[in-house]
Image (cartoon, helix red, strand yellow):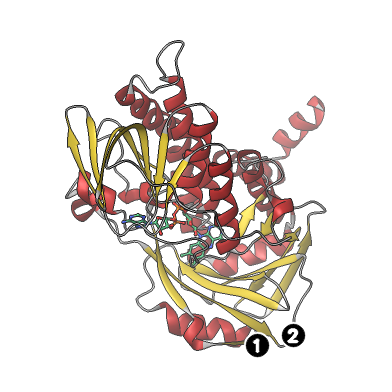
Amino acid sequence: MAPKASSPVWEPAPSQEIDVLVVGLGPAGSTALRVLAEGGVSALGVDRAEFPRDKPCGGGVSARTLPYLPQGLLERLPHQVTQGVFLTLRGTQELARDFGRPIAYQVRRDLFDLVLLDSARDAGARVMTGVRSVRLERVSEGFLARIGPHTVLARAVVAADGATSKVLRDLAPGIRERTLTPPWTSAEGWARLRQPFDSRYVAIDLGLVAGGYGWSFPKKDSLWGLGVAGFLRPLKDPRPVFSGYLKSRQADSDPKGVLTWSLPNFRSARHGRVPGLFLVGDAGGLVDPFLGEGIYYAVLSGTMAARSCLRNRRPGEDGLDRPERASKDYVQWLNENIWPDFRQGSRLAQAIYRFPEFFFKLAVRHPSLLSLYASIMTGEHDYRSFSREIILGALERFLPVRRAARGGAS
Ligand SMILES: Cc1cc2nc3c(=O)[nH]c(=O)nc-3n(C[C@H](O)[C@H](O)[C@H](O)COP(=O)(O)OP(=O)(O)OC[C@H]3O[C@@H](n4cnc5c(N)ncnc54)[C@H](O)[C@@H]3O)c2cc1C
């Protein structure tokens, strides 16, 4: 069943104090807001858009995201389950693999984001949408936010306002400008395929997009979401690359519906400079450097930022007590869990997108490589354990001694 439009917005008093202000209500912000509200921390979420609103995105939600989503969310949304992949090399040779279990859920971002926001509201969070401007400054008691005619004093701020984060520019001017590694670039649009394929599969092409890949995800009513993204260096103009990909897929798309967008490069993220400030989702550079997957990391980082706040509540009470400590905890979690894995994912991207023919031939000879990809989408592996598995597999193939040792053990 399709979700309904969101309920009316909350209006604050002209001047108000809260524990946490969440700016931006995509998957990262709405998740943080919901988890905070569920934990009894007073939180206000604001977004410049009215919901439902769209966002350029393939809308592929990996299976590993499910544990961090509100219960029963998918039942409230039209979606397509995908459980296999068609891998092509420059639109020609083809390799198919069915994993026999869901690896991703294909959703429409306008509806997905709306339902996430409604879940935060249902948990008791206060929400303002269609907000024209939010101006933030650091003061001794926390953060002073001017939201249109209202003034809000917040003890902590969650920046969830996407790849071009204004919060970051307000509170930490110069961080992005000085340290920015160019963002990855992409183009996407919806299309009709003249030769549609099984909609339980996603299609990935290697080789047509220099330093990246092209994708086709099933959407609805025989429509497919197609896109291209470059991860080794920005595609100067992704549109012609996208046209080439459409041609190879024999797809008809409305050229006016083609959107180009940046994907944040995690190497430009600088966390922990402003105590009490949490950078989540795209605003924090949390996009996977190999697959370009951002929804999982948006939802995960929103959850972890909120949980860090919940761990730093006043003893026996609901309010946030130690915002600086909470943001430090969050940065530590990123340092221990996310960045080491992204560095490994980035190495994998360098190897595979630089030498697509080699990888394709390898995958033809060893289809288990594609199963490893599925195990990332389902959360059974991360990039570090994935790479270890590949190296072990290679060792076993080429070093009989090791194979014997493993065989002996089992
Ligand atoms: C072409 C393309 C395809 C993609 N495909 C996939 C995919 O298939 N699967 C996947 O997992 N990821 C995909 N991604 C990545 C994914 O879309 C993002 O990583 C994800 O949307 C990040 O969520 P977020 O909540 O951080 O930011 P967003 O979803 O960008 O939300 C940010 C919110 O902040 C609001 N905002 C912005 N500025 C302000 C402001 N100044 N004041 C108030 N509010 C503001 C916006 O209105 C918006 O609602 C894709 C990205 C692109 C570009």
Q: Residues within 10 Å of mark 2 (few under 14, many from 20)?
A: few
State which quadrant residue 41 falls in.
Answer: top left
Asked if ligand 1 lies within 8 A of label 1, the reply is: no
- Left or right of residue 334: residue 375: right
- Identified at 80% across, 32% down, the residue is 407
Mark 2, secondary structure of its residue: loop
Tags 2 and 1 touching, CB below 8 Å: yes
- Identified at 47% across, 47% down, the residue is 28
State which quadrant residue 327 falls in.
Answer: top left
Q: x, y (%) of residue 15?
A: 26, 38
Q: Quadrant of ligand 1?
A: bottom left
- Identified at 49% across, 68% down, the residue is 56
* Residue position marked by numbered label 1 in the rendering: 250
- Identified at 31% across, 39% down, the residue is 271
Mark 1, secondary structure of its residue: loop
Q: x, y (%) of residue 63?
A: 68, 48
Report whether residue 80 is seen: yes
* Up-down relation of residue 116 to residue 241 (above or below): above
Residue closer to the observer: 294 or 275: 275
Report whether residue 103 is seen: no
Q: Earlier in the sequence, mark 2 or mark 1?
A: 2
Residue 195: image tag: 2
Residue closer to the observer: 11 or 36: 11
The amino acid sitting under disc 2 is: Gln
Q: x, y (%) of residue 34?
A: 52, 38
* Up-down relation of residue 307 to residue 123 (above or below): above
Quarter occupied by the N terminus: bottom right
Q: x, y (%) of residue 84?
A: 75, 61
The amino acid sitting under disc 1 is: Gln
Q: Residues within 10 Å of mark 1 (few under 14, many from 20)?
A: some
Mark 2 to mark 1 CA distance (whole Å): 7 Å
Residue closer to the observer: 152 or 370: 152
